[in-house]
Image (cartoon, rainbow, N blue to C red):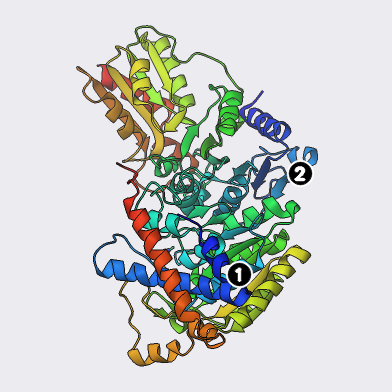
Amino acid sequence: MRVIEGINTSLHRFLADDPAAHIMGEDILDPYGGAFKATKGLSSAFPGRVLTTPISEASIAGVATGMALKGKPVCVEIMFGDFVTLCTDQLVNHMSKLPWVYNDQIAVPVVVRAPMGGKRGYGATHSQSLEKHFCGVPGLTVVAVSQYCDIAAVYAAAFASGTPHLIIENKLSYARRLEQRDVAPHAEPDIAIVTYGGSTEVCVAAADRLDAEEELAVNVIEVTTLSPFDRDGLRERIGDCRHVLVVEEGADGWGFAAEVSRALMGLPGLSFASICGPAHPIPSTKSWETALLPNETNVVAAALDLIL
Amino acid sequence: MHHFADLVSNHAADDRTCDYMLMSLIRQFETKLLDLFSQGLLSGTTHTCIGQEANAIALMAAIDKDIDTVWSNHRCHGHFLAYCGEVHRLFAEIVGRASGVCGGRGGSQHLAWRNFFSSGIQGGLVPLAVGTALADRDKGAITNVFLGDGTMGEGYVYEGLNLASLWDCPVLFVVEDNGIAQTTPRDRGVAGRIAERARPFDIESASVRSTDLAVLKPAAQEAARYVRERGRPFWLHIETVRLRAHSKSDDTRSEAELEALRELDCLDLLRAGMNGETDLLDTEVAAYLDACFDAAMKDPEPCA
Ligand SMILES: Cc1ncc(C[n+]2csc(CCOP(=O)(O)OP(=O)(O)O)c2C)c(N)n1
């Protein structure tokens, strides 16, 4: 099963399990089934509960909030993650905030799905990884998935939580086969690579190469819940390893690497480095884009730099 | 504290007296807040609805409070008091007490009580109104959302009109057009005519230029009935007046302009149609307000 099918199955289950549940988004009806086919088959199986919307991201998130607080949970698809900026006011000022401000008199079971990431040559406005802008928002849980995580469990937990979630999917990962593989198998690794979402694949490939070519034991630590960030949990997973590389695709600064470094601050003898996306927009030239973003080659090089 | 409804039922034999007591309550509540602010006894901000009370009373009389939902805005005290009359709890919220409607988390502009909600982002609640209307449509419920003329500048309004029309959502859009947004007069903030904003979306509308409760009540009833019976949105445009500052003391209008607006004071209009008993009612309401405020001040703070 591929990632996109795993997601599709989870959405199917969401609608099947709760007769009040709805899905909303742009171009999500059959026969098209969404720009990446995540919702394929759903409108045929659950007519009336899969709502195709006008191109109104801000309002889709708001309508979902209104429905959810009336006991109708909604999963929203944002066609390209880049467009989630249009939902910022709803995510930050409404969906995540009102339950607390209203003294928990309402609950907002809304899950927003946003496909992020580059390397498909889509250019500056369809390739970004904008999740850091939504991390650290009280009341909003931000989750990222890849082919290595238990997609069914992550989605089921988000739907069961009854609270606002933003799930970051990755456009390249959609086509990958689900792989229940332990990517952090070593008890005493030489290097720990901390990453999430679409960058996990690159890190796993780099770890395999460092093992094959350099006989280095590398654990890839995939973080699924980006926000709120579990600092203690991360320190536990790092264990005694003191060579830590952080890999993320988002633009440089105020991001995942900063949060990881905060979690590890004060560890004696820590050797720390990070790789991230460029400090300028992503170019559409595919080879250039791939060179700028974390890739197997630059991750291997950074890991070797760290250890040597 | 006993409920405001009990006070009213002790006095009011007829609808007009009930309406008068409610309008007097809202007016005096808001005036008291301004007094307290000027004495430095309150912190934060407030937006009083002085001059616009009749809109709140008319709309709340037109809905079914058991099932309908109301989305208010920053200028929400009148809407709230007309919705539920929870005076003590509103005072408690504004002075930051655990007994407040939101336990002291919300304050003046973030209220929630049963199916009544308000918040402080202009236009941001419009899509939520579409959502609640859609969610509760099968119950026969409608959703009412309040907007100001200045909020016509927000894209949310037009996204909401589009969706509400496309999806047959029973949303009653109520525009309280007081001709000014903070300090920006309508002719600097709004192009075209507010009354006609909804037409291109195939949404029916009505425009009322009045502060007279006797005119506003049937207009609101008619609008709410249309929304419920047709299962369609409706756009009710009310030309009204803001008689006091935007919030506490920020009024840039001239005294002459305000003088003219005061001619349209909804409380005076209502009082004119009544016998001499209004002074007595005002006094009763004032005593009730004082008692509610004093009780709220004695309640514990949420962080205590
Ligand atoms: C999105 C947003 N922008 C600006 C403000 C600041 N603000 C609060 S009320 C207000 C004026 C609103 O005018 P209008 O919609 O006409 O309502 P009125 O105050 O006249 O009742 C402004 C600018 C806000 N609360 N939200």
What type is the residue that disc 2 sits on? Asp
Q: On what subunit does the disc labeled 2 rest?
A: A
Task: Please state the horizontal and vertical placement of residue B250, each as a whole percent of the image.
Answer: 31, 75
Which corner quadrant of the figure contains ligand 1? bottom left
Task: State which quarter of the image contains the N terminus of chain B.
Answer: bottom left
Of the pair B176 and A88, the residue shown nearer to us: B176
Task: Please state the horizontal and vertical placement of residue B158, each as a whole percent of the image.
Answer: 59, 67
Point 29% across, 61% down: residue: B42
Q: On what subunit does the disc labeled 1 rest?
A: B
Of the pair A220 and A264, the residue shown nearer to us: A264
Point 38% across, 21% down: residue: A233
Q: Which residue is mark 2?
A: A30
Q: Secondary structure at mark 1?
A: helix
Task: Please state the horizontal and vertical placement of residue A166, each as a whole percent of the image.
Answer: 51, 39
Point 45% across, 29% down: residue: A225
What type is the residue that disc 1 sits on? Leu
Instruction: Note whether B247 is above or below A149 in the view shown.
Output: below
Q: Is residue B185 left or right of residue A95?
A: left
Instruction: Note whether B15 is above or below A204 in the view shown.
Output: below
Q: Secondary structure at mark 2?
A: loop
Of the pair A78 and B57, the residue shown nearer to us: B57
Residue B59 image label: 1
Q: Residue furthest front?
A: B10
Q: Is residue B56 left or right of residue A38?
A: left
